[in-house]
Image: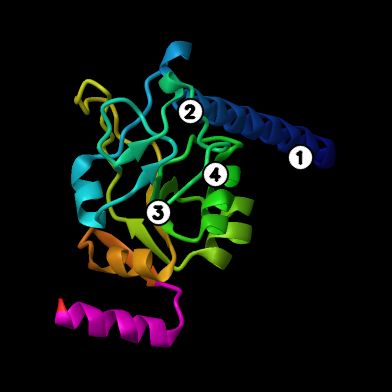
Amino acid sequence: MWLPVFFVRHERNRMAGNQVARTAHRTIIDRSRPPEEGNDRWITPPDVIARLGHFDLDPCGAPGSLTADRLYLLENGDDGLRDPWFGRIYLNPPYGRTMRVWVEKLVAHGRGTALIPVATGTKLWQEVVLLEASAVLLYRHRIKFIRRDGKDDDMVSPQASAIVAFGNRDAAALSRAGLPGVFLDFRPWYLRMLSKVVAWFL
């Protein structure tokens, strides 16, 4: 009689796990909805941006954010996936199913830095990030995001975060940022050496 009981228990655990996953997925998506849908967007802390350096464009901008010179805003009718990208990009994409589309566009652009959740078992990480990134910083702490009103209470990330650099210059900037965490450099050895030489003269 143990065999049917085992399968019933296994099926119950599987269904419970799927329900937890769906609930977590809905929570993540809800937190990325625009304000008109009743949820605020999570703004990257200014001290993190300051350490990463100057950015030309944030295609997922939010009012009150200081992430880049130019922000694409939903409030202005901008579409960060449709509108042209230029210069150095800072990307904190909406969590959920569209995240891969945003990151792939950054890969195609070739120059920029993204802040995304650490999920190395996902297709996004295994098929895009780990194959295309120039460098990755696995952030040591949970990032405390900022609301549009400047407050950060109850805005701690529910997941570990990674800062992902695409392009040699962004990888070099990430290596010099001094942010806490484990830095993984995926660049060829000669580019790593070149960055060290340039940093020595700065």
CB under 8 Å between callouts 4 and 2? no
Which of the marked residues, 3 or 2, is nearer the chain's N terminus?
2
Residue position marked by numbered label 2 in the rendering:
78
Which of the marked residues, 1 or 2, is nearer the chain's N terminus?
1
Residue position marked by numbered label 4 in the rendering:
102
> For this view, does 6 lie left or right of residue 117?
right
Between the C-alphas of marks 4 and 3, the distance is 16 Å
Element type where label 3 sits in the image: loop
What amino acid is found at the position of numbered circle 3 in the picture? Answer: Gly
Magenta segment boundaries in residue numbering:
185-201
Q: Residue 150 is drawn in which quadrant?
A: top left
Which of the marked residues, 4 or 2, is nearer the chain's N terminus?
2
Judge whether residue 122 can be spotted in this image. no
- Please tell me whether residue 189 belongs to the stretch shown in magenta: yes
Q: Position of residue 2 (x, y in %)?
A: 80, 40
What amino acid is found at the position of numbered circle 2 in the picture? Answer: Asp
CB under 8 Å between callouts 4 and 3? no
Q: Foreground mark, 4 or 2?
A: 2
